[in-house]
């Protein structure tokens, strides 16, 4: 591979323990924030099909995806560490 990036799960501060397992994420009461057509959307659809989703349009900035979690509109999101670091 030419490029490798890890994708991490991010939750609102203080709620990390609520989403510590794959089983905890794969329930209808968990809202996963994502941007249409991105890897986080693929992860949510394939690994957590029972979870609810909060979708942003394709051209959205990843900061908006992180804002879904910080504002409570989504419980978790999946982004690579570089994106999260630039947001945090």
Image: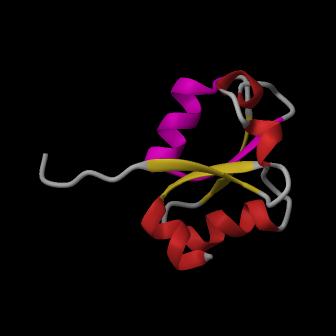
Say which residue appears at 52% left-offset and 72% top-offset: 85
Asked whether residue 78 appears in the rendered view, the answer is yes
Q: Please state which of residues 5 and 51 is positioned toward the viewer in this rendering.
A: 5
Q: Is residue 60 positioned above or below 18 on the image?
A: below
The quadrant in which residue 18 appears is top right
Asked whether residue 61 appears in the rendered view, the answer is no
Residue 61 on the magenta span: no
Q: Is residue 58 positioned above or below 17 on the image?
A: below
Residue 35 on the magenta span: yes
The quadrant in which residue 31 appears is top right
Say which residue appears at 55% left-offset and 67% top-offset: 84
Q: Is residue 24 left or right of residue 10?
A: right
Q: Is residue 51 left or right of residue 46?
A: right
Q: Is residue 68 left or right of residue 35?
A: right
Coordinates of residue 66 in the picture (x, y in percent): 65, 65
Q: Is residue 61 positioned above or below 9 on the image?
A: below
Region in magenta: 30-49
Q: Quadrant of the C terminus?
A: bottom right
Coordinates of residue 61 in the picture (x, y in percent): 53, 73
Say which residue appears at 84% left-offset and 50% top-offset: 15
Coordinates of residue 26 in the picture (x, y in percent): 71, 25
Coordinates of residue 19 in the picture (x, y in percent): 75, 37
Q: Please state which of residues 2 and 21 is positioned toward the viewer in this rendering.
A: 21
Say which residue appears at 59% left-offset and 73% top-offset: 63
Q: Quadrant of the N terminus?
A: top left
The total of numbered circles placed on residues is: 0
Q: Residue placed farthest to the left in the image?
A: 2
Q: Is residue 35 left or right of residue 2?
A: right
């Amino acid at each position: 591979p030419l490029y490798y990036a890890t994708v991490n799960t991010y939750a609102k501060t203080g709620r990390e323990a609520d989403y510590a397992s794959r089983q905890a994420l794969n329930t209808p009461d968990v809202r996963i924030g994502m941007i249409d057509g991105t890897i986080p959307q693929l992860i949510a659809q394939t690994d957590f099909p029972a979870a609810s989703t909060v979708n942003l349009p394709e051209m959205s900035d990843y900061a908006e995806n992180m804002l879904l979690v910080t504002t409570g509109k989504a419980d978790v999101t999946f982004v690579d560490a570089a994106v999260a670091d630039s947001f945090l």
